[in-house]
Image (tube, helix red, strand yellow):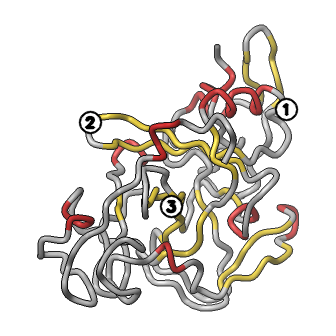
Amino acid sequence: MTEDTLDELTEHYEGCRCDAESCSPTGSCSCISRFGPAFDASGRLQDIVPHTDLLKPVFECHDDCSCGQSCCNRVVQHGVTAKLQVVSVGHKGVGVRSLQPIARGSFVCEYSGELLSEKSARRRARNTDPAMHNYILAVREFFGVKLMTTYVDATYAGNVGRFINHSCEPNLFVQPVRVESAVPRVALFALRDIPVYTELAYDYSGGVNTTAKSDCKLTSDIGEQTVARKPCLCSLSHCRQVLPYDDTLFVS
């Protein structure tokens, strides 16, 4: 985390006091009851929502809970369980593929990096040419009645998630998941069933304005400057031609 991470995100959540080894989605588990059950008995996300303006928070049980590690409400905290491989993907450079089939709703991996405040994200974005690769991911969700944005930068610290490419027709989507505090882990889940040896991809916009025609310009006006945009290489028939970026980070 950076030193200017938002202080309110450090709030720690009290664990549940469920008696069973695994909490019940229909029981009185305090972790599950905050926003309702998120996972089924197989650990797959029940609500497949690829649009960030519709996301609801997901809370997992954690070390302060009385349930065990096999609890159905513990998924992302166990880390990557699917077999993934970083490979060359031709003109796109490197990417990530699955070495096994992945079922719809399954957790794939986190997008790990430095958690930034909006101030830090703006500063870094302004020092990065939009035509160059940008590892700052902005994820928006409704946290109760409040719209919350989480900024994660994988430029200097990250995991396999930083190698996953963008696609205008992705097979993964972003879902913030909270374990012990309001600081979310930015998790990638399967949007549909994914066959073995398939390249993994998600929408870098996080599902925001994915069909906006204004996003398809090869140049953008930032302040008084007109800058080139980084082209999208997904090669799909409805490709938006350029990679999405969060233009709010460039506006004072």
Please state which of the two labelled residues, at mark 3 or mark 2, is closer to the viewer.
2
Q: Residue at x 21, y 88 (%)?
A: 20
Q: Residues within 10 Å of mark 1 (few under 14, many from 20)?
A: few
Q: Which amino acid type corresponds to the residue marked 1 in the rendered image?
A: Asp
Q: Is residue 207 above or below residue 47?
A: above
Residue that numbered label 1 is attached to:
129
- Label 2 residue SS: loop
Q: Is residue 220 above or below residue 174?
A: above
* Numbered tag placed on residue 145 in the rendering: 2
Q: Position of residue 214 (x, y in %)?
A: 59, 27
Please report whichever mark, 3 or 2, sits nearer to the chain's N-terminal start.
2
Please state which of the two labelled residues, at mark 1 or mark 2, is closer to the viewer.
2
Please report whichever mark, 1 or 2, sits nearer to the chain's N-terminal start.
1
Q: Which amino acid type corresponds to the residue marked 2 in the rendered image?
A: Val
Residue that numbered label 3 is attached to:
173
Q: To which quarter of the image does residue 163 belong?
A: bottom right
Q: Please name whichever residue, 236 or 26, is drawn nearer the observer in this view of the structure.
A: 26
Q: Residues within 10 Å of mark 3 (few under 14, many from 20)?
A: many
Circles 1, 3 touching at the beta carbon (< 8 Å): no
Q: Residue at x 62, y 33 (%)?
A: 246
Q: To which quarter of the image does residue 97 belong?
A: bottom right
- Label 1 residue SS: loop
Q: Which amino acid type corresponds to the residue marked 3 in the rendered image?
A: Phe
- Label 3 residue SS: strand
Please report whichever mark, 1 or 3, sits nearer to the chain's N-terminal start.
1
